[in-house]
Image: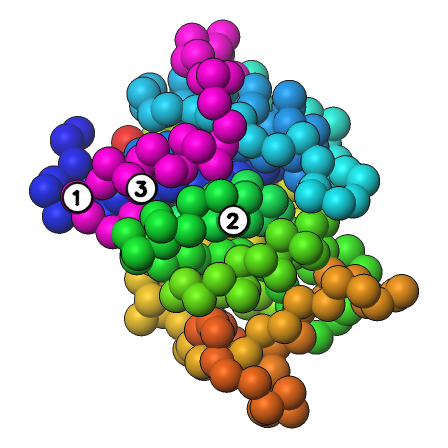
Amino acid sequence: MLKNATSTPVIISTDPGIDDAVAIAIATSDLSLDVKLICPISGNVSLSKTTLNTQKLLTFFDKSIPVVPGSRKPLLRAAKDASGVHGKTGMDGYPFPEVNLPVDNSMTASAAMHSVVNDSTQPVTLIGIGPLTDIALFIHEYPDDLANIEEVVLMGGSLGRGNFGVLSEFNFATDPEAAKIVFTSGLKIRVAPMEVGRQAKIMPNISEKIKSLGKVGDMSYKLFSKYRGGSFNKGLNMYDALAVALVLRPDLFEEVETHIEIETTGRYTAGASLIDLKGYLDLPNNATVAVNVDAEGFEKWFVEEIAKTI
């Protein structure tokens, strides 16, 4: 299907990842988004695996979208992964077809982002559903491009406790210095934090319904059965699809403008995102944060989006 003239141009930075896979399925099939570029990055699993997973997904979806691999590690820190949640390959549980989509290794992810943004006649939306290393490098290397960025929409951070450290969430805490660069960029930023992903559960009856929705529904169901983000029996946390939902259905969320400060030096708290909902820091707002999601509405939207892929 052809994108319409008013489709929002989008770049996705991602580390697939089971929930990334579903987010990419939705973003690449919804006609109101025009995904210009996907940049896999080291995160849930290594860069070689996230790149291969991106190729697998786009081959499976039959989408010819440019893929430019990004960073193998954070700016200053050692690489971490979340294979304990997503399995050794990052997308265990589904027999994907042989890959037939090439990747472009002739440039960096930040240079590829620059090329898309510089050439776009419409402001571009950046969707970050992994560590923020490549988005930070783009911001640092191409400051003149920022005028043509509509917004940066992220899944990451936490309102309270973390899943990476005591107070830190995986995507932001994997590369705190990169997150700091993003949140001090002056760009319009919207964030879906970890706790909202835990509100947006896909319950077992919905997983069963999704299974019948074509090949993407079948893939989603089988990946979900291996996913440790919540419980297949008690409800799965749909973290990364939240960022896509924030772009497509902001009405599903309660959002608050606030300041987000990224801790980079704390011995035990590096990577923590201080989402200052009560104004303790007395600093200007630099982001809009989702604090609640209409769980029933999200579930309905999620099923409708998977159905669009048939």
Span shown in magenta: 96-125
Where residue 13 sits: x, y (%)?
A: 49, 41
Question: Which residue does the numbered mark 1 point to in the structure image?
Answer: 121
Q: Which amino acid type corresponds to the residue marked 3 in the rendered image? A: Val
Q: Report which residue position mark 3 lands on.
A: 117
Q: Position of residue 49 (x, y in %)?
A: 64, 23
User: Toward the viewer: 82 or 187?
Assistant: 187
Please name the amino acid that badge 1 sits on: Thr
Q: Residues within 10 Å of mark 2 (few under 14, many from 20)?
A: some
Q: In which quarter of the view is residue 273 placed?
A: bottom right
Q: Give the CA distance from mark 2 to mark 3.
A: 14 Å
Tell me which numbered mark, 2 or 3, is placed earlier along the sequence. Answer: 3
Based on the picture, tell me whether residue 121 belongs to the magenta stretch: yes
- Nearest to viewer (mark 2 / mark 3): 2
Q: Position of residue 96 (x, y in %)?
A: 52, 17
Going by the numbered disc 2, the residue's amino acid type is His
